[in-house]
Amino acid sequence: MAAIIEVKDLYKTFQTKDATVEALKDISLQIEEGDVFGIIGMSGAGKSTLVRCLNYLEVPTKGTVLIGGKDLAALTSSELRELRSKIGMIFQNFNLLMQSTVIDNICFPLLIHGTPKAEARKRAEKLLETVGLSSKAKAYPAQLSGGQRQRVAIARALACDPRILLCDEATSALDPQTTQQILELLRKINRETGITIVIITHSMNVVREICHNVAIVENGEIVEQGLVEEIFTHPKSRAARRLIIEGKDPDQWEKEQEKTAAHGSTVPELHEHRRIRIVFTKNSSYEPVIANMILTFQEPVNILKADTKDVGGVARGEMILGLSTDKGISDRQIAYLEERGLAVEDITDIAAEAGVN
């Protein structure tokens, strides 16, 4: 499948009063048509700047952005406006017109582009049906919940029938249940229309739920990218390993560490020096692997964390284990797990930072 978005050697520099800030450094990526692509990183990593470069709301300092093979830097102002009409965008704070009704909010971009009023209203009514808000056409944004406002924002972003939908922290202001509903809606829209969706987020849960591919951004650089399932199973970069191991949003780490310090660790010290993360594949899900390993080596194992994560609609089990302090024994334990088809990562340093001890 052809790439609809290509970014090559992209840099973005901001000049402040006191210094020059490199927000993006040597970014290169390709996003295929019809993909749901995640860009994830902690606050200040540069991910929102990157997404705004994709439609030239931010003009890169250096590098190339191609949309459908067209170099955005080579377009005239009118050509760029026309191309942007095919790139919808939704935001964390919804950006709705508060003095306009729901249906007028959706009609707005259509009327701006010269669509006859009757035709615009018909299109808006169809989109309201798509997002499940037909009964709210005459309501005002202040009368809606956060999830309903985001549905209106999605409908408005789809008004001009775009090929690409950019979502900049679109679920960050929503509760977990509403987030799940919005992600399911986006998944449905992608499946039914084939639209390419780019999701900017700091939540690994969002990426696991909906994205096929992901790029991880740290300090303005892409440190890892690839299939979500592959990175979940075998994270290579330090940033990816931290995001995956934590199992929650990065900004929750400090709270968790403070809580651990306040209440004290409940994990025995005997096996705290060697920590591993294991991921169960379909073939390794039926054998009581941990129990059999304990019987085989006659060595206790601490289960520090156990969870099941939804990765692209497939449940994947993961555990963090504390192994023997004897490296020879723990090496043999790891080999035992790998022989049984489990993906194993040594995360001793990462887990220590995360407060898993």
Image (cartoon, grey):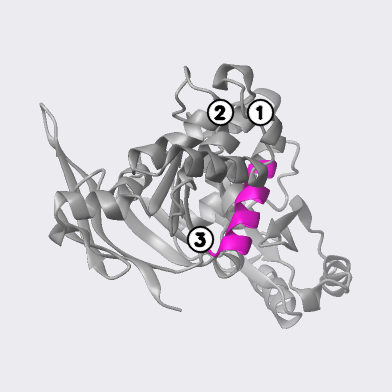
Q: Is residue 352 magenta?
A: no
Tell me the residue that label 2 is attached to.
102
Question: Bounds of the magenta span?
Answer: 180-195
Which of the marked residues, 2 or 1, is nearer the chain's N terminus? 2
Tell me the residue that label 3 is attached to.
195
The residue at 29%/55% (across/down) is 83
Badge 3 crowding class, 10 Å Cα cut-off, few under 14, some 14 to 19, many 20 or more, is many
Q: Quadrant of the C terminus?
A: top right
Q: Label 1 to label 3, Cα distance in Å?
A: 25 Å
State whether the magenta stretch is mostly helix, strand or loop: helix
Q: Secondary structure at mark 3?
A: loop
Q: Is residue 40 visible?
A: no
Badge 2 crowding class, 10 Å Cα cut-off, few under 14, some 14 to 19, many 20 or more, is many
Badge 1 crowding class, 10 Å Cα cut-off, few under 14, some 14 to 19, many 20 or more, is some
Check if mark 1's residue and mark 3's residue have beta carbons within 8 Å: no
Viewer-nearest of labels 1 and 3? 1
State left or right for residue 42 relative to residue 23. right
State left or right for residue 181 relative to residue 174. right
State left or right for residue 39 relative to residue 261. left
Check if mark 2's residue and mark 1's residue have beta carbons within 8 Å: yes
Mark 3: which amino acid? Answer: Ile
Mark 2: which amino acid? Answer: Val
Q: Position of residue 101 (x, y in %)?
A: 54, 23
Which of the marked residues, 3 or 2, is nearer the chain's N terminus? 2
The residue at 52%/56% (across/down) is 241
Which of the marked residues, 1 or 3, is nearer the chain's N terminus? 1
Q: Is residue 191 magenta?
A: yes
Q: Label 3 to label 2, Cα distance in Å?
A: 23 Å
Residue 125: quarter of image: top right
Q: Position of residue 115 (x, y in %)?
A: 40, 44
